[in-house]
Amino acid sequence: MADFDLSIDEKRVYADKSGKQTVYVAAGVGVVTVDVSDDLVGGFRIDRRCTARDAAGSPGEVAVATDEDVLLVQGGDYHELDFGPATAVGFHRNRVVAADDAGRVARFDESGWADLGAVGAVRALDGSLVAAEDGVYRIGDDGLSHVGLDGVNDVSDPAGRLGGDSGTPLAATDSGLYALGNGWMDALDGAFSAVASMPDGRAHAVGPDGVVARDAESGTWEAAPIPLDETVVALAHDARAAYAVTDAGSFCVRLTGGDWRTQVLGLDTVGVAVR
């Protein structure tokens, strides 16, 4: 195990925090951290200068894809993982996964990077799912296998991300939002560009009419528009709230059952993550 690796017990300690959160935003100027207390947005700052292309979170850590490498953030430290330039990053069973411009997908563990396979241009990674130019792929014991759909822009797989068994995989595509059950099932029609979900059933997605949210108890989807004339480009959740960043560089936070609160960052934002 790498000397900077967190144990599962340590990750639970990080995940047990409440009230205050540091949110990591991937932007053209680097990794920007935003202080949030409940739904109140505090200060923000450039925490690491780089060209960030994507960000993903797991309890206790955040991974960032940059034009030079994959960074793993633990505590206040940024660790370079020697992947090379990356276009997308995620977590599979609490381990970092990353993809590059050529469609190479690999997973990082105590032995370093292990290649999982190569696909079309990768648009997103989450849990056991890969959103690629030519459809959705699943990470398995024998590498990557194609599991359908076309025009896939984003995926969310909370069970595969955390190594548990709760949460329904979702895929945002040009033709609709899909849930994985006995095959891919229609959830909502229209072009969807982003999706994020949690094991408890909460989910948000960006569709033709803006942001929609799924109620954890009823499973129904309802409109949850941000109070800005901007388009959400990335979403994330923790135990208390949903987070979003927009194409115009605004940051948004919404407590479960509450309203969106916003803060202008004025940056070229492409991703958001919490740990």
Image (cartoon, rainbow, N blue to C red):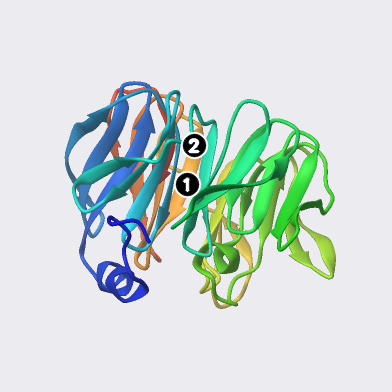
Up the image or down, 22 lies above or below 44; here it is below
Q: Secondary structure at mark 1?
A: strand
Label 1 sits on residue: 235
Name the spot of residue 83 as percent of width and height, x first: 48, 36
Q: Which mark is residue 221?
A: none
Q: What residue lies at 43% left-to-right and 36% top-to-bottom?
A: 82
> How many other residues sit within 10 Å of disc 2, few (<14), some (14-19) or many (≥20)?
many
Specify the quadrant that holds the C terminus. bottom left
Q: Is residue 29 left or right of residue 197?
A: left
What residue does disc 2 label?
232
Residue closer to the observer: 251 or 210: 251
Q: Position of residue 140 (x, y in %)?
A: 71, 61
Report the front residue among 166 and 232: 166
Of 152 and 91, which appears nearest the observer? 91
Q: Are marks 1 and 2 in contact (CB under 8 Å)?
A: yes
Q: Which quadrant does the N terminus fall into?
A: bottom left
Q: Residue at x 18, y 48 (%)?
A: 76
Say whether residue 274 is visible: no
- In the image, which is nearer the foreground, mark 1 or mark 2? 1
Disc 1 marks a residue whose amino acid type is: Leu
Depicted 116 relative to depicted 54: above or below = below
The amino acid marked with disc number 2 is: Val
From what the image shows, is residue 215 above or below residue 192?
below
Q: Nearer the viewer, residue 49 or 69?
A: 69
Q: Is residue 104 visible?
A: yes
Q: Is residue 68 left or right of residue 176?
A: left
Label 2: which secondary element: strand
Residue found 63% across the figure and 42% down from its top: 105
